[in-house]
Amino acid sequence: MSNTTAVLEAKGLGVEFGGLKAVSQFDISIGDGELVGLIGPNGAGKTTVFNLLTGVYQPTEGKFFMNGEIMNGKPTHLVVHSGIARTFQNIRLFKNMTVLDNVKIAFNRKMKYGLASAVFRTGSFWKEENEIDEKARELLKLFHLEELADTKAGNLPYGKQRKLEITRALATDMKVLLLDEPAAGMNPTETAELLESINMIREKFRISILLIEHDMSLVMKICERIIVLNYGQILASGTPEQIANNPDVITAYLGKA
Amino acid sequence: MPKARKIDYIINLAGVIVLFFLLMFIFDTELLGRVRSYIQGIVIIAMISIVMVCSLNLITGFMGEFSLGHAGFMSIGAYSSAVVTMALENAGIILPDLLLFLIAIVIGGIITALMGVLVGIPALRLRGDYLAIVTIAFAEIIRVAFTNFQITGGGKTLSGIPKLSDYHYVYVITAISVCVMYMYVRSRFGRCVRAIREDYIAASASGINVTYYKVMTFTVSAFFAGVSGAMYAHYITSLIPTKFSFNYSAEFLTMVILGGTGSLTGSVVGAAVLSALPEALRSFQAYRMLIYSVVLVLVMIFKPSGLFGSYEFSLPGVLRTLTGRKKGGAKDE
């Protein structure tokens, strides 16, 4: 993949917590529709990279861009508005809200009606609410969740909660999706289902994905490019074959013989 | 607007109007005899508390943050409206009671809402315990300020406020306030605020501007606390800053929690019951605070989410249940 159509780009990105460099000199360039894997041992800084790329942490060094626009200093919700959405390692849903409402939340930025409109239930209120309702249900249908629309999100089985989180991220109308260990804690059937969902959204929405995952068979199977992180720095990057045969990576993962 | 929804609204509105006539029937006839004005007083105070408690529930129930200084907002509404109506009277401007009452309500609401924004922007960066402390501090500052300002009586009782809050007006304003808050909660604003309560990190990761929606809800809540304060001032007709102490705020919080955090129906019932309970228990004078406390403890043990949890009452919904035609739509009313 060439870098000519980079959607999300980071140059020398890093963050320091009181003298401790959690991540430093992180470079990445994700092209349109590309699926990049981010792997590394526990504590290597993978989730920190996600937090940097979504504005949760402000980088202390380097810059990152979305469609050429600089993202440094933007709060999370504005980063989301510019097209970067994420899921969380420990699923974060609005557990006491319905499945449908979880998706509607992500559509909120598309809704324009104001306070007065809400209080008097004007035409624009109903129009927008109905539109969002329809869109949210359509999206749920893609993930076979439409029948659970009125269930509380917290009552869904684990695999479905993951799917719902991805659905919610999709509803923000993003271009780049950051998936933080989506297959963690899943049984093989659920993992297969997840794989199917990922392939489906790539085809349908033409989005780029950055994936953190420990399930190596999954990573090797779907990633076009892999970046290996160790002690907050990039250890290697390349195609799955290159990574699998890289001696540094093998040492980092398995320890020196 | 969907037709079924329209019919539901009309039925609910009819219920509100019927209740109004019921009150008129009770208070305007000789039905109650000598206790009439006593009962009427309790009902008015209960209605004022209903507005207060619903507004506090926006913060405590729907936003999931503790405000322990809500009486502070009430006092701003009370004093600001009282100062304005008294100034108008002193200037010799004679206005009809209704107009003067509406002026008081609007002034009380808007000034309190402005204070809500001012306090909300810095305070809502905090969460949980820290925010609770800030709200207590805010209410104390307000109380001390009102004790020292000359215009608010300077530590003495501010008396001579025109008595405008007769129960017709108070009832209508209460009904409108509760209705507006309900509409707020059942809109995208309410949805965002509930999402923030559930998980603010996930909310911002879904593109929600967390601070914006928090401050907005805080402001709406402050507005209605001010409205409630304005009605209070023009019913009691004399104000003293010590009334709006921490204890008073805590009383409202009790009502919210008893009724159910996250249910406006619960707030209405909680406020009505707990306003009337001390009066109803007057014949057990010695034990009344004991019974009051025991009721609270029992509710918290057996129904920690409050009497209503997050259930909302709706007349059409109840009618459907009663006639056995329960439909799915009932629950979002």
Image: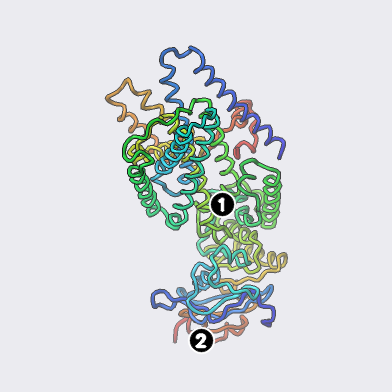
Nearer to me, A178 or B240: B240
Q: Which amino acid does label 1 sit on?
A: Cys
Nearer to me, B297 or A216: B297
Q: Which residue carries the number 2 mark? A: A248
Q: What colouring style does the render use?
A: rainbow
Chain for numbered disc 2: A
Q: Which mark is residue B192?
A: 1
> As displayed, is residue A126 above or below residue A31?
above
> As displayed, is residue A256 above or below residue B53?
below
Q: Which residue is drawn at 35% across and 38% down?
A: B153
Q: How many labels does the image show?
A: 2
Q: Residue B276 carries which label?
A: none
Q: Residue at x 68, y 35 (%)?
A: B6
Q: Residue at x 32, y 20 (%)?
A: B283
Q: Which amino acid does label 2 sit on?
A: Asp
> As displayed, is residue B331 above or below residue A8?
above
Q: Position of residue A52 (x, y in %)?
A: 52, 71
Q: Position of residue B292 (x, y in %)?
A: 34, 30
Number of other residues with Cα within 10 Å of mark 1, as a class: few under 14, some 14 to 19, many 20 or more: many
Q: Is mark 2 on a helix, strand or loop?
A: helix
Q: Which of the 4 quarters of the picture holds residue B151?
A: top left
Q: In which quarter of the image is the N terminus of chain B?
A: top right
Q: Position of residue A53 (x, y in %)?
A: 55, 71
Q: Which residue is drawn at 54% across and 50% down?
A: A155
Q: In the displayed orientation, state which residue is furthest to the front.
A: B92
Number of other residues with Cα within 10 Å of mark 2, as a class: few under 14, some 14 to 19, many 20 or more: some
- Residue A56 visible in rendering: yes
Q: What element carries label 1?
A: helix
